[in-house]
Amino acid sequence: MTAPLRCSLSHPAALERVPRWDYEADVIVLGFGAAGACAALEAARCGARVLIVESAAGSGGTSALSGGEIYLGGSGGTPIQRAAGFEDATEDLYQYLLMVGGPNADAAKARLYAEHSLRHFEWLNAQGIEYKNSYIAERCIEPATDDCLIWSGSEEAWPFVQRARPAPRGHCPKFLGMGGGRYVMDKLAQQVAAAGVRVLFNARATALIADGGRDVHGLVLRLDGEPRFARAARAVVLCAGGFVMNREMVKQHAPLLLRSQFPLGTVDDGSGILLGASVGGVMVNMSEGFATIPWYPPGSLVKGIFVNGQGQRFINEDCYHGRVSNYILRQPGERIWLLEDHATYATGEMQQLAKIEIGAAGETWEEIERELRLPEGSLSQTVRLYNQYAAQGTDPLFHKAGKWLKPLDEPPFVALDCRLDYCFYASFTLGGLDTLPSGEVLDAERNVIAGLFAAGRTACGLPRWGEGYSSGLSLADATFFGRQAGTRAARTTR
Amino acid sequence: MTAPLRCSLSHPAALERVPRWDYEADVIVLGFGAAGACAALEAARCGARVLIVESAAGSGGTSALSGGEIYLGGSGGTPIQRAAGFEDATEDLYQYLLMVGGPNADAAKARLYAEHSLRHFEWLNAQGIEYKNSYIAERCIEPATDDCLIWSGSEEAWPFVQRARPAPRGHCPKFLGMGGGRYVMDKLAQQVAAAGVRVLFNARATALIADGGRDVHGLVLRLDGEPRFARAARAVVLCAGGFVMNREMVKQHAPLLLRSQFPLGTVDDGSGILLGASVGGVMVNMSEGFATIPWYPPGSLVKGIFVNGQGQRFINEDCYHGRVSNYILRQPGERIWLLEDHATYATGEMQQLAKIEIGAAGETWEEIERELRLPEGSLSQTVRLYNQYAAQGTDPLFHKAGKWLKPLDEPPFVALDCRLDYCFYASFTLGGLDTLPSGEVLDAERNVIAGLFAAGRTACGLPRWGEGYSSGLSLADATFFGRQAGTRAARTTR
């Protein structure tokens, strides 16, 4: 029998016209990445019958592609922060998260996360995710070792440092090499199996099932080429990732991200967001995304300066690489360089990930300027002014911290070519469904949609502003708010 | 009897539960601004029974607050363009409109408008809107006279001029003084009355009426404190303006616009957009808005330069004031100045509208720099470099056209304070429902929603990108695509 229903990702199937129920559960979770795994786990532990529906052949989603790093702190610090000498206050974490969220930060989520982050760390431990008690003080993007604690954001950089006492909060799992996300997902998947959660792999959601176009009662799936009807007695939790792989949606909502050629995603086709919108869920911050050129280590490169096609600086280079890249995206013109001198460039090889090449080299900045075909006096004047103040240990224009200030005056000089169409820029989306901290999906007037939750990048969570993103925030948000959604979904009564 | 229905702006009333029909029409148009008037007119002229529902006590909406200027051209030029010596090619208008639309411009709408703009001018004439055959070559924002043709965008400025042959396209109605929008609306309202359109004033839409949560069949209204049910046999056309007066929605979707303290709107509470979203209509470009400090005339001010809080230039000052302001919104920090010398500032008074005051004055740029507490060498170096090239008649960094280039070297000098929290910055929203050129509202997968149309700022039309906005585009879009929507709505069959 073929589906008798008119329905699609953007149009829910009418409850009264569902021909049969092929599956029944209390809570149906769409997506088996970090958010989905955590939602399923907590729902099952609340006594709910849980079904995970996953379009891939196994668990992991985009979470498994990540480094597995999770942004944690507050409450005096995690044991690893404390061992490294950081007493991380809840209020500092909260203030930092507000800055992360930007002009429409979700204060309620930031507050809840700041207050419960330490307990969330303990919960992650309890799922079998191990952390080595170690701290890397040097700038890194993701440790190639199994070390844990790193600086993963703009905590020490202006203007963040003015509002919140800095602490390193990136917690990487005890996993040797890059790619700890798979390790984290394996641990969560083991727990999911142990909790008796049923999983349907290779099953694609094609529509929500709703009563009156609004109250959610289940999902229409496609499995083995056939439609299947799955009933959720309590709620559906959408944890199907963002939309970075749906290039039409990116063009429609976040066209600036098209400038990055390396979308970070697995499925991330926006289907979770579309399903939520089909019953009135409102999409927010859809134009925002994480985009980055991972240009350090070595940390000495931070002593260099970024200039745009006008030869102007535009940011304090000591902030998080994603923030720098977000500024790069918004510079007029296409050309961006990182200027270094012999001392700052020669101290180490650039991390291979970065794929940044030399655009010009010379014995004077005027020579570099000519080689880059910049107007005479533009770049050279910028460097001269920077050097003059750096020699005095200040950066009055962009507020780079003193420890990164050094005149770029030791030839030979280089201009590293950081053009968007030339370098490795990675991206993912930060816009999604508006939700309460409980994961309940909201309509445009902020009314709760009955029977529907969302978490992870299907929702718009703590990270929602490209200029504020810090590594480990997406997984922190996905795991923590996935848990909230699972718990609340299991307790939903109709 | 009170409303027995569960419904809201974000939740349609179920068709089968509507208790009675208080009003019936073929086409119901929500909003009696320019888009609504044009939609109603064309629908009535196609033979449909039309009902306009307007929340105010009279016609006009935000269109009546405008200058009445409409962006027109192409097809060899309007008679007024041709009389002024401009043969405006359709392809040039089309290319310009693509740039106006930015990274996700709607090419289909741009094409349709470019090809039919001349005929639209004739249609406007036929509604009784008169245009004087006159052209103002000098920079102005809105003529205080009854003159017609003005430069109202960035046509002559880089980078626009590189892609489309420039022509003035702002057509102001023959109305003495500012505020021609009321004149335009009066003419349209006379036609609406003559066409036999029924109008309900003081009637607020509270929900759509939909079948299966999706196909639109009417509106729930509130009139005299009571719910009323209005049936649309063919379609509902949403022409209820944007959302700039709904500050919660602005915070949620376009937080940058909160920096402008002068929202340009009447109702513009987002209700039209919310109604469309309630049946699956997708909102696009919600973060974009028009924001402007109307800082010229006199045109000589264009010879000055804008600098940010780092003392850097950031734009070619000869582009449209709204584009400049959009760049201002995105500058780091709060401080922005317009630098002028005796020759460029003393030639005329600033237009009173602008409310820009002097932040610093002095005999040297170094003095200005100190007075503004900018780091020594920052602003003064910027001016020195600008002057050096201006003396040669070039602006290699920002490409201001030659006729505006003059070294700022005649003391006394001034820095006009253009801070966002200090000056008159006006704004309105450019995000709205995604629609086809016909006005049909689309869901997130770009499927048409049956029985629903939108136009004007309730839809996302030609103007959808703050950096590209030009005066007259919003009314051009509202009137032209309002007409398309009315025509198609009248011909809709279920």
Image (spheres, coloured by chain):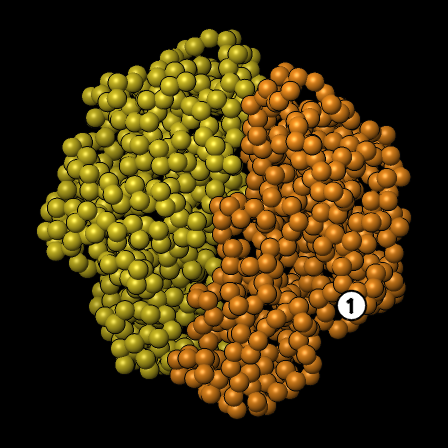
Chain colours: A orange, B yellow
Which of the two residues, A458 or A108, is positioned nearer the viewer here? Answer: A458
| Residue linked to disc 1 | A144
Q: Is residue A71 left or right of residue A271?
A: right
Report how many numbered discs are placed on residues in the image.
1
Give the class, few, some or many, for how many residues have Cα within 10 Å of label 1's Cα (few <14, many ≥20): some
Quick check: B119 above or below B36? below
Residue B99 visible within the image: yes
Q: Give the image location of residue B430, x and y in percent.
A: 41, 44
Question: For residue A57, what is the image quadrant?
Answer: top right
Q: Which residue is drawn at the image coordinates 31% and 69% (left, top)?
A: B400
Q: Quadrant of residue B341?
A: bottom left
Q: In the figure, is residue A405 to the left or right of B350? A: right
**Residue B165 x/y as whole percent:** 24, 59
Q: Position of residue A120 (x, y in %)?
A: 82, 48
B179 relative position to A223: left or right: left
Of residues B219 and A132, the one nearer the viewer is A132
Left or right position of A149 against B304 = right
Quadrant of res A140: bottom right
- Residue at point 57%, 40% (across, down): A283
Residue that appears at 20% across and 21% down: B194
Residue shown at 43% from the left, 76% from the top? B379
Where B12 falls versus A294 (above or below)? above
Q: Residue B326: image x %, image y %? A: 41, 56
What amino acid is found at the position of numbered circle 1 in the picture? Ala
- Quarter holding the C terminus of chain A is top right
